[in-house]
Amino acid sequence: MRRLGFSALLLAGVALLGEGLWIPAKAELAQVLMEDAWERIRRGEEEAAPWPWADTWPLARLRIAEGGEDLFVLAGASGRNLAWGPAHVAGTAPPGAAGNSVLAGHRDTHFAFLEDLDAGDLLWLETPDGAIRRYRVEGAAVVHQSDVSALEPALEPILTLITCFPFDATVPGGPLRYVVQAVAR
């Protein structure tokens, strides 16, 4: 009976570990698949899907000068797309264009690094045509999800990064958002 109980606990532990590792593994795999799609887009293929059933494609490449983050940004910030990587919020300026370009990502995978960004840090956003726009972090704020001021249009090029808050929450979602704003330099 003890062996059976031990085996059941061991099996449950392995299952929980696998479930916990699935999301980070999926996030890493997606970035590898998106790199291939990115290269196809750079060669002229429009809306190159990173995997056969994808209804999204990489719009931009986001790099953080300090910390080595290198992420592909997907078209459309739906819950489905956010599971694979950071995504562009529809209705905001296209990545790299003049205006406020808003990107969303999960706090426990792709946008976990936001917690460590400081004012003055540099971000690079590359578009498929090879243009690179540099941004300097101006600051960050915690806001309620009902505060949509971070989505407001702007005349100058702004990059806004949004994720859920707090970073160490054990329950997904919640009413708070962490908003980082960076201006083109």
Image: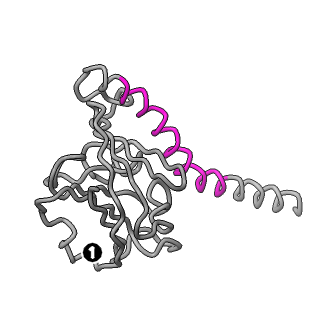
Residue 48 figure quarter: top left
What residue do we see at 78% from left, 57% from top?
10
Q: Secondary structure at mark 1?
A: loop
Residue 118 figure quarter: bottom left
Residue type, mark 1 in image: Gln
Magenta segment boundaries in residue numbering: 15-39
What residue do we see at 41% from left, 50% from top?
83
For the residue pair 137 and 153, the one nearer the viewer reads as: 137
Locate the N terminus by quadrant.
Answer: bottom right
What residue do we see at 33% from left, 50% from top?
134
* 173 horizontally vs 150: left or right: right
- Name the residue tied to disc 1: 145
Tell me if residue 173 is in the magenta stretch.
no
Tell me: residue 154, above or below residue 79.
below
Tell me: residue 54, above or below residue 65.
above
Residue 128 figure quarter: top left
Residue 24 on image: x %, y %: 54, 50
What residue do we see at 27% from left, 75% from top?
145
Residue 43 on image: x %, y %: 30, 20
Residue 124 on image: x %, y %: 37, 48
Main SS type for the magenta part?
helix
For the residue pair 149 and 167, the one nearer the viewer reads as: 149
* 33 horizontally vs 58: left or right: right
Residue 50 on image: x %, y %: 37, 31
Locate the C terminus by quadrant.
Answer: bottom left
Tell me: residue 69, above or below residue 59.
below
